[in-house]
Amino acid sequence: MGGSRTGQVLLMLAGLIAWAVQFTAIYGVTSTLCGRGWADATLLGMEVVPMTILSATFVTLAATAVALVWSFRSYRQAKRQPVAIVDDFISHAAVLVNGLSIVVILWHGIPAFILPACA
Amino acid sequence: MSCALAVAGCSGVQSALDPAGGDAQRIYWLTVIMTVGGTLIFLLVTGLLLYAIFAAPERRAWLGGRRTIVVGGLAFPIVVLSVLLPYGLTVMRDTDVPTPGALPIEVVGEQYWWRVRYPAEQERGEFLTANELVVPVGRPVFVSVTSADVIHSFWIPNFGGKIDMIPGRINRLNFTAERPGIYRGVCAEFCGDQHARMAFDVIALEPEAFEAWRLEQVKPAREPDLPLLARGRELFRTGGCGSCHAVRGTEANGQFGPDLTHVGSRRTIGAGQFPNNIGTLAGWIANVQHIKPDARMPSYGSLTGEDLRALAGYLESLK
């Protein structure tokens, strides 16, 4: 299993970091705009609130997907050769955490398609 | 027998398990699905737990296998929650949709009663009432709620979900009564010592009956037609009741307490506490601080029995 330990841990946490970024962007923008009565604010002809949710979801989803592919590669690599128990754990956890992060990011993005912006 | 009794307890004037409108119906089915699904999953997990404890080691070994963990611990919850999330959000969305042509009603929560205003609509005039919502069957109702003091919550279980009443903010709720009847709404957010005594009646009438009720409510208070009632009106005037209560058509124009123009036509008094009749009205006037401590109205226990009868009779005559 290649890469520094810091890199391995960052890869393992990549999905959670992406989720935190999506969460902060969505709640920050939505609560600010809705709280100030700017729910209908538009940018380039598109409503800012749904656009923020969709773009934050798309970007973080893409980043997590890349992290998942990468962590899966590391996992397969770790399976092929004998590695330290810590590396084995990290490679397993990275796949699991990044996979679950994709699900969670999707769950956070779903309301944008169903509920009004400031419901 | 106990099941029959339990199910019988689910119906009634204040029950989310006896929906009388579309929104309540959707919430009811969400509740049923969550409860039944949750119970089945609980039983399954409990069964597996008992199996893991008591089964022979070679028979229970599969429980610790990777496939069981991935399917039971990951795939199953993800699939279930992925289905429930859009379903629950859809119920919320449908509940919140404002409906064109809806009957507008404004409700202000106050410690510990409900100020209800029907705004003017086309040629129909506006009027105020209290502690009672009368709605037509089949027509969507659009309720705007706020609070005059602390946070309250407006909830008619038979018609839909709760909505907070927040000072300085107007929240909105839609519902449609689908069958005539008498229902009960409550304050669903602790708002003070008398929170539990802050209820209101919801009366769903056929459209013609609703229009007739509305026409009556717009009218000023009727003149007393008996000497006793005239004496009651005079007591109302000289006692200063009009500084807090309004009776349209008289000089009483107080805005602090409930509008009493048609108080006699209401089913209950004291925000759903007692049936409305001369006896309970008299008891309320004389002992309000005993019945509902911390209500803003003082007790008028110093009135003589005769005066009390006259005053209560006058109020009861305001149909």
Image: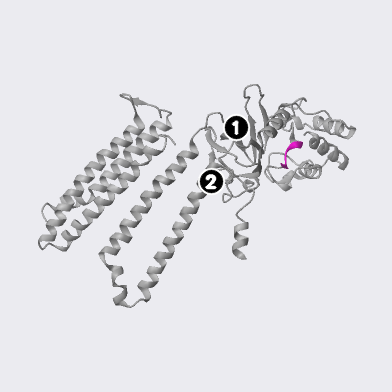
Question: Residue A73 location in percent, x, y?
Answer: 14, 52
What residue is drawn where x is 30% and y is 60%? B71
Q: Position of residue B305 (x, y in %)?
A: 86, 43
Q: Which residue is mark 1?
A: B106
Query: Is residue B3 toward the left or the right of residue B243 in the image?
Result: left
Q: Any magenta on residue B13?
A: no
Marks 2 and 1 on same chain:
yes
Badge 1 amino acid? Glu
Residue B68 occupies quadrant: bottom left
Where residue A59 sits, quadrant-wise, is top left
Q: Secondary structure at mark 2?
A: helix
Q: How many numbered dots are placed on residues in this image?
A: 2
Of pointers 2 and 1, the one earlier in the residue sequence? 2
Element under label 1?
Answer: strand
Q: Nearer the viewer, residue B204 or B108?
A: B204
Q: Which mark is residue B2?
A: none
| Magenta residues (range) | B264-268
Is residue B265 shown in magenta? yes
Q: Is residue B198 visible?
A: no
For the question of whether residue B300 can be seen, the reply is yes
Subunit bearing disc 1: B
The image quadrant of residue B126 is top right
Q: Residue at x 26, y 44 (%)?
A: A18
Identify the image quadrant of the C terminus of chain B.
Answer: top right
Residue B25 got which mark? 2
In the current view of this chain or complex, which residue is farthest to the right?
A: B227
